[in-house]
Each structure stands twice: as structure tokens, then as C-alpha cells.
Image (tube, rainbow, N blue to C red):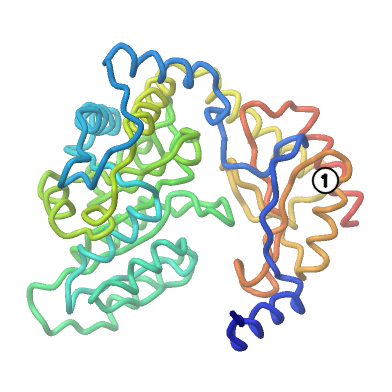
């Protein structure tokens, strides 16, 4: 059967723009690309503890068997959601199959017709896709620019009563690694009686004494309408949870399509989430090592004169702006040939002219590895 011509043309355009994506297998290079910030994805102790936990519970089921509203709401869900809610000082937590499902489910169901969504222009694709599914009106504001946000609120000239304004941002942005000024953002939110929604995908395991995320580490959790915690990064497993009130959880169970119409996670997947959270509580040295590596990275890039290339970041994500798909791909390739797995992020994933080398830091990277990869980068760009 012939492939449609219009789709073939789009693939050809991607190749011509040097932006064609391919899947690659894992490699033995030094990891500066994965989101496994604490090494939990490769943790034998989490793997073994999960297995033993299931044996102790006499759970020998491979799958959930159905959606959570039918047959898939096994007992581990309740235990894990309660633990997550307590860990994050939230009233409730509800687990979704992935961060993408959580964002699509939330934004596709919570904001109502005539409601307003104001979202940071660099919010993740899953947030944008959820907003598209919503019946609410949506407007983006300039990245981390709360003067622009406030002006957009003023320009709305709201005449309809009983509508809500949702302000949406991320605690750590996935491509830049930077963070909003939450005290300033909350001031704007409270001034105009808005509901604040924060995606904490890249903050869990990275910020806070026990890796609880940026919002909670700042003591601002009670100021947030909903927090989205994703487990595929710092926790090294799969799934996500939305934190909020009991009413929010009840509403999502009844109206979030990505929750209602999908098979639940397997008992093994949910048990892995629970064991990863237990590990967070006992891994303060690992979290501290990650923080030390972030400080060391920032110090080294300053010494080498690389600071102007990088987006300002105190997170595990460090991005050097190197415009042009071909140029940044070439630099990434040179680093990989020297044994360092750092990835080029190309347009259209990021805007044209904002192509970048994205370096992810981990607790298991050594100071020497960090110094070496930055030294090589300095040689390649200057």
C-alpha cells in the first residue's frame, strides 16, 4: 500500500532541514543525556525491593486487567496514592499512567467553557495538547515574564461571572532548566484570584531536602491549585500523580478521559513508584551529590568562559544555545565520539535559532567527567 504523498513530503522536509528523528539504542557512553537524575532507573535495590514487596503482598499479577473504574484499581493504588499525598503534604494524589496522560487529562477536563488558561510560552507539549482538548480560551504569556502575564489578565476585561482563570507553568522547564520566581507569580495569582497549576516533572528528586520538588521546598504547596508530579525522571520509573484537593481528585476520576478510558498501571509499576518514593526518603546523600554536581558544573562553565552560551539554570538541566541544527548536531557528535552522551535538541522541538546542546547532570557523574565534558565543549565552540 502506498504511503500518502503529503506525508512523504513532510518526512522529506524534515530530512532536508536536518531535523529528521530516529530511534537509537542505549550506549555505553558517559550519561549526560538521560533524565535519570538520581540513578533510580538503574537501581538494583529498588528493583529487588519492588520484587520482594510484591511477594510479601502475595501479588503475582502481571497486569491491571482493566481501567481503574472497572477491574484495574488494585489495592496498591490506594496505598501508593496515600503515601504520595503524605510525602508531598497534599490532601490527595491521583496516579495517571504517565505525565503526558496527567496533563492531557487535567487540562482536557478541568478548565470549562468560558474559563481562561494563561500558560507560559515554553510549557511542555503535553500541557499544550491538553489545552487544545479543553473548551476554555487560552493565551500564552512570555516566558517567566509576570509583567506580561499581569497585563494579559488586565486585557481580558472579564464580563462573564463565575469563570476561572488558570495560570500554568513548570517549576523546572525541560529544555531550559530554568525556574519561575514563584513568590512573584503567586502575588499575581492571588491579586486576580487565579488558580495556579504547576508541572513539577523535572523538580521531583532534585529540589528539597528529600527531593520533594521545588514548590514544597519553598513551602508554597498550599498556594497551588494542582501540582503534577512525573515519575519518569527523578524517580526512574513510570507514571505521574496530580496533587490537590479531594474535590479535584473526585472530578478527575469522573471526567478525565485519559484516566477513565485506559487500562491501569500494573501492580509491579505501582509498587515500583512506591519503592522509589521510599528510596527518596533514605537517599539524602544521593540528592546532595546531585546538588554538588550542579554547583560544580556552574563553577566550571564560568571558569572556562562558557557562561554566555548557557541558559541560566540551577537545576540538573543545563542547555548551551548553539544555533543551527547542523552545527549543534556536529558538536554533540564530537562529544559522543569522545565518550560523552550529550544530546542536540533541534528545531522544531525548540524554536529555530534556539537549537541547543542539552546536558543533564546526575548524582552518579563524577567531578572529572563534568570538567572533561565542559573542557571538550569549550574546545569545540571556541
Q: Residue at x 77, y 38 (%)?
A: 300
Q: Residue furthest front?
A: 1
Instruction: Decide: is 121 above or below 81.
Output: below
Residue depicted at 25% across the width and 28% down the height: 76
SS at mark 1 in the image? helix
As drawn, the residue found furthest toward the left would be 161
Camera-nearest residue between 75 and 277: 75
**Image height of 235 relative to 68, above or below:** above
Question: Where is 315 relative to 285, above or below?
Answer: below
How many numbered circles does the render carry? 1
> The N terminus appears in which quarter of the rendering?
bottom right
Residue 110 point in image, percent of width and height: 20, 63
Above or below — where is 261 with respect to 120?
A: above
Residue at point 66%, 85% (across, down): 9
Image position, residue 342 (x, y; %): 73, 47
Q: Is residue 358 left or right of residue 200?
A: right
Judge by depth and name the residue closer to the eye, 334 or 267.
267
Give the image quarter of residue 311: bottom right
Which quadrant of the rendered structure holds the C terminus? bottom right
In this image, 292 relative to 124: left or right? right
**Left or right: where does residue 2 sit relative to residue 220?**
right
Residue 96: % across, % down: 31, 46
Q: Foreground residue, 231 or 152?
A: 231
> In which image quadrant can residue 368 be found?
top right
The residue identified by callout 1 is 336
Front position in the image: 365 or 106: 106
Percent of width and height locating residue 106: 27, 58
Snapshot quadrant of residue 10: bottom right
Return the residue found at the far bottom. Answer: 5
Amino acid at each position: 500500500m502506498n504511503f500518502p504523498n503529503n506525508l512523504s513530503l513532510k518526512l522529506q522536509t524534515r530530512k532536508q532541514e536536518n531535523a529528521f528523528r530516529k530511534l537509537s539504542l542505549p550506549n555505553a557512553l558517559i550519561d549526560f543525556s538521560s533524565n535519570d537524575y538520581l540513578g533510580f532507573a538503574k537501581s538494583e535495590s529498588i528493583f529487588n525491593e519492588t520484587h520482594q514487596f510484591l511477594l510479601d503482598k502475595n501479588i503475582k499479577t502481571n497486569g491491571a486487567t482493566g481501567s481503574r473504574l472497572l477491574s484495574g484499581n488494585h489495592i496498591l493504588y490506594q496505598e501508593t496514592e496515600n503515601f504520595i499525598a503524605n510525602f508531598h503534604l497534599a490532601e490527595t494524589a491521583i496516579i495517571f499512567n504517565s505525565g503526558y496522560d496527567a496533563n492531557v487529562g487535567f487540562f482536557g477536563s478541568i478548565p470549562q467553557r468560558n474559563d481562561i488558561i494563561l500558560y507560559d510560552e515554553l510549557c511542555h507539549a503535553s500541557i499544550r495538547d491538553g489545552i487544545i482538548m479543553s473548551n476554555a480560551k487560552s493565551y500564552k504569556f512570555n516566558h517567566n515574564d509576570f509583567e506580561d502575564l499581569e497585563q494579559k489578565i488586565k486585557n481580558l476585561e472579564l464580563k462573564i461571572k463565575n469563570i476561572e482563570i488558570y495560570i500554568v507553568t513548570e517549576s523546572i522547564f525541560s529544555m531550559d532548566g530554568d525556574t519561575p520566581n514563584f513568590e512573584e507569580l503567586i502575588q499575581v495569582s492571588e491579586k486576580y484570584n487565579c488558580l495556579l497549576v504547576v508541572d513539577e516533572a523535572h523538580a521531583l528528586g532534585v529540589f528539597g531536602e528529600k527531593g520533594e520538588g521545588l514548590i514544597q521546598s519553598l513551602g508554597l504547596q498550599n498556594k497551588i491549585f494542582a501540582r503534577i508530579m512525573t515519575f519518569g525522571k527523578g524517580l526512574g520509573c513510570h507514571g505521574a500523580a496530580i496533587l490537590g484537593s479531594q474535590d479535584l481528585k473526585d472530578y478527575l476520576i469522573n471526567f478525565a478521559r485519559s484516566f477513565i478510558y485506559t487500562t491501569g498501571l500494573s501492580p509491579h509499576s505501582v509498587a515500583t513508584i512506591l519503592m522509589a518514593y521510599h528510596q527518596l526518603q533514605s537517599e539524602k546523600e544521593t540528592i546532595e551529590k546531585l546538588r554538588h554536581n550542579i554547583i560544580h558544573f556552574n563553577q566550571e562553565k564560568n571558569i572556562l568562559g562558557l557562561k554566555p552560551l548557557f541558559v541560566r539554570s540551577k537545576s540538573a538541566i543545563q542547555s548551551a544555545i548553539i544555533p543551527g541544527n547542523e552545527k549543534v548536531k556536529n558538536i554533540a557528535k564530537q562529544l559522543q565520539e569522545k565518550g560523552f552522551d550529550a544530546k542536540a535538541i533541534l528545531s522544531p522541538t525548540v524554536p529555530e535559532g534556539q537549537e541547543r546542546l542539552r546536558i543533564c547532570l546526575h548524582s552518579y557523574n563524577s567531578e572529572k567527567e563534568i570538567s572533561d565534558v565542559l573542557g571538550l565543549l569549550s574546545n569545540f565552540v571556541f
